[in-house]
């Protein structure tokens, strides 16, 4: 078999499902796939990673915390799938994140903690546990070729730990080398994913990997940071000296999850051309997301495009062959409808080719606010795209794009509707549902653009008419939402990707007024209005105190050159105010480590005088605790009590300074929720 890697990754990131797993095995055999990558529920603290697929032997006291029934199920169905592909020489891998230990591990082995109560990575017990669980995994799945290692989104984030005996590069090398040596001893392979969003983290990871072995295979994404049709080629490829396999997404994790039509002819061919210039070993393509799959849909064409591009075959011939196979005499009509959907997605769902959304097609509320200076400004509207401050982001241009997209998608929907009664019902619905979703979602994004502009104008100038326009746009979206749900039910994209109440609601006992149907438009109508009411009241209260400056943390007016670390800071709406966390909610659920999270603002001061900063917030366990850094002057603070608490600090800015940088950083097991900062 060729050394060229041609792979698929699937079950991303969901429980193993027998029928679909074996369908993927059949696809791999038919398309001469060489690399078969099972992702699984990586973010589940019970079922995720090698830990969730395996019963420990030496550390069996922690098996009581496992889903034994799921493990036995996986042992059967995964090994059956491996038996299917083994005769064809297809290599198989499972996704694994580190550092992960059982939730009670520090209770049973308290010696692993350092003086601050955090895990000391280099403790011998950690090494022994890692070696044993990898041995247990391959004992359970003996035909698995290897594991794909990621060192992010874990209970114990290696790069974020403090007070360790060794530095960042050394601890990445230490943990990775344990797994690498264990795999090598067992005749298995280890592939590493840098998966970093900050250049320094990326360099630290690659420095460690290079020290372990110049032959260690690195798997990296073909777009910068994460998946998008508008994000640039991955510039970090130039940094990688080790052999490289490229990770792709041809399904739509960040562009629709398969619920809207997209034919990625240009995206795939352009990215493959770029990657080939780096002499890559091959490609592994994500083909699903969140339980939604490509097979039996018009978007399956992207698998055929990728297959042809990697093999060096004619892409157009592969596209034609797919549509003829799936739609027979009506292939030309379906292909005509699919043509241009890639560019239409960009026009409908981005602003001047900048994504205003992430994690799904529909944006979270706070990616719409005016924090365009955030470190990862490619997620939001950048400052240079605005005129007159951030009030107008060339809204006329953006809205013209949206309206043009709505018109063009409507014409494609009408073309698809001519196939009703011609294609069999199942095939017709699969195509129609996606185009109907696309049309409705494009109309919603038109109103989101109005909403974004209106909110920016309101918080810049206090324009009440702009606030009324924002509310009107929400009402229009609600009507579109109702239309989609009435016709498509849970296949309507906003409904299919409905979000549960934020964990803040669960943590603090706040419940939405209506839980019957929580689409994301529903949350715009309820949570956004709550957010606006709370923020408007907070701003009024602050202004009455005549401060030098203030920030409503997590609000639409936040700005102040906000900086934070991706995945380690979030904006939340509580019943008593909006706030920002120095750390992730998910991180708080996973771990009580003291390492996660920071954010900072540039705030105005009274020159040449004593200033006092007042910080209001609370901790998830009743204790507000954080490290405060004001232009490099660091202090630690902790206070306990009910409700929102207040911490003050007096400081004098350096001569001539009109602003200071104020940084809030988590420093304890208590996750801080910060409501406001005021300098007086």
Image (cartoon, rainbow, N blue to C red):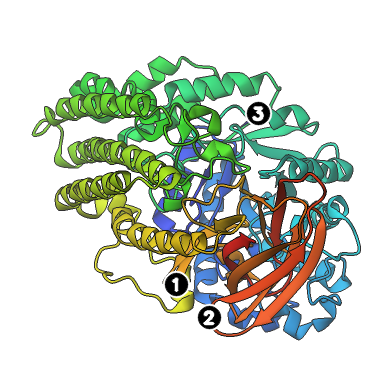
459 vs 573, nearest the viewer: 459
Which quadrant holds residue 436? Answer: top left
275 vs 317, nearest the viewer: 275
Q: Taking 469 as reference, is 665 above or below it?
A: below
Provide the residue designation for mark 2. 643
562 vs 355, nearest the viewer: 562
Q: Residues within 10 Å of mark 1 (few under 14, many from 20)?
A: few
- Name the N-terminal-most of marks 1 and 2: 1
- Name the N-terminal-most of marks 3 and 2: 3
Q: Image quadrant for the N terminus? A: top right
Using the rendered image of the protein, determine whether residue 51 is visible from the camera's viewpoint.
no
Using the rendered image of the protein, determine whether residue 638 is visible from the camera's viewpoint.
yes
Under circle 1, the secondary element is loop
519 vs 283, nearest the viewer: 519
- Name the N-terminal-most of marks 3 and 1: 3
Q: Image quadrant for the C terminus? A: bottom right
Task: Point out the residue furthest to the right here.
Answer: 165
């Amino acid at each position: 078999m060729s050394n060229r890697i041609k792979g698929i990754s699937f079950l991303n990131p969901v429980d193993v499902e027998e029928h679909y797993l074996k369908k993927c095995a059949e696809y791999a055999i038919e398309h001469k796939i060489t690399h078969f990558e099972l992702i699984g529920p990586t973010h589940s603290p019970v079922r995720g990673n090698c830990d969730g697929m395996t019963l420990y032997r030496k550390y069996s006291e922690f098996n009581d915390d496992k889903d034994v029934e799921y493990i036995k199920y996986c042992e059967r169905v995964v090994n059956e799938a491996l038996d299917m592909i083994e005769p064809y020489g297809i290599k198989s891998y499972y996704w694994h994140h580190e550092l992960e230990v059982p939730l009670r591990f520090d209770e049973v082995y308290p010696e692993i903690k350092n003086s601050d109560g955090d895990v000391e990575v280099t403790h011998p017990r950690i090494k022994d546990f890692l070696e044993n669980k990898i041995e247990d995994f391959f004992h359970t799945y003996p035909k698995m070729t290897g594991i794909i290692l990621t060192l992010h989104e874990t209970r114990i984030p290696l790069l974020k730990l403090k007070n360790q005996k060794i530095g960042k590069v050394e601890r990445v090398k230490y943990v990775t080398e344990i797994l690498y040596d264990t795999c090598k001893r067992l005749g298995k392979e280890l592939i590493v994913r840098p998966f970093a969003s900050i250049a320094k983290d990326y360099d630290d990871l690659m420095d460690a990997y290079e020290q372990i072995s110049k032959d260690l295979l690195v798997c990296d994404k073909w777009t910068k940071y994460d998946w998008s049709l508008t994000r640039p080629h991955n510039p970090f490829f130039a940094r990688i000296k080790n052999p490289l396999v490229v990770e792709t997404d041809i399904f739509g994790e960040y562009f629709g999850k398969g619920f809207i039509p997209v034919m990625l002819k240009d995206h795939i061919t352009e990215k493959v051309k770029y990657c080939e210039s780096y002499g890559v070993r091959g490609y592994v393509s994500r083909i699903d997301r969140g339980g939604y799959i490509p097979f039996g849909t018009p978007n399956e064409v992207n698998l055929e495009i990728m297959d042809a591009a990697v093999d060096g075959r004619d892409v157009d011939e592969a596209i034609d062959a797919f549509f003829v196979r799936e739609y027979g005499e009506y292939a030309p009509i379906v292909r005509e409808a699919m043509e241009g959907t890639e560019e239409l997605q960009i026009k409908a769902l981005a602003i001047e080719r900048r994504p205003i959304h992430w994690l799904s097609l529909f944006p979270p509320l706070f990616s719409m606010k005016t924090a365009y200076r955030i470190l990862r400004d490619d997620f939001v509207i950048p400052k240079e795209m605005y005129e007159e401050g951030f009030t107008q982001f060339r809204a006329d241009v953006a809205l013209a794009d949206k309206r043009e997209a709505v018109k063009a998608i409507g014409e494609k929907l009408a073309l698809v509707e001519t196939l009703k009664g011609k294609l069999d019902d199942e095939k017709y619905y699969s195509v129609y549902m996606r185009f109907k979703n696309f049309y409705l979602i494009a109309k919603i994004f038109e109103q989101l653009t109005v909403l974004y502009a209106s909110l920016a104008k309101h918080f810049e100038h206090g324009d009440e008419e702009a606030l009324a326009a924002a509310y009107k746009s929400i009402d229009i979206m609600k009507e579109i939402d109702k239309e989609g749900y009435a016709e498509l039910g849970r296949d309507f994209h906003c409904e299919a990707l409905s979000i549960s109440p934020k964990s803040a609601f669960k943590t603090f006992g706040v419940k939405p007024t209506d839980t019957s149907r929580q689409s994301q438009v529903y949350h715009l109508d309820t949570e956004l209005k709550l957010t606006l009411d709370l923020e408007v009241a907070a701003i009024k209260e602050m202004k009455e105190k005549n401060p030098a400056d203030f920030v409503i943390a997590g609000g639409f007016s936040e700005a102040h050159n906000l900086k934070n670390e991706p995945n380690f800071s979030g904006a939340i709406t509580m019943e008593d105010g909006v706030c920002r966390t120095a750390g992730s909610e998910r991180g708080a659920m996973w771990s009580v480590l003291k390492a996660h999270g920071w954010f900072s603002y540039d705030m105005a001061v009274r020159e040449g005088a004593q200033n006092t900063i007042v910080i209001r917030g609370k901790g998830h366990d009743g204790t507000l605790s954080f490290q405060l850094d004001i232009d490099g002057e660091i202090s630690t603070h902790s206070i306990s009590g009910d409700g929102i608490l207040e911490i003050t600090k007096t400081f004098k800015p350096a001569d001539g300074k009109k602003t200071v940088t104020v940084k809030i950083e988590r420093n304890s097991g208590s996750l801080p929720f910060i409501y406001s900062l005021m300098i007086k």
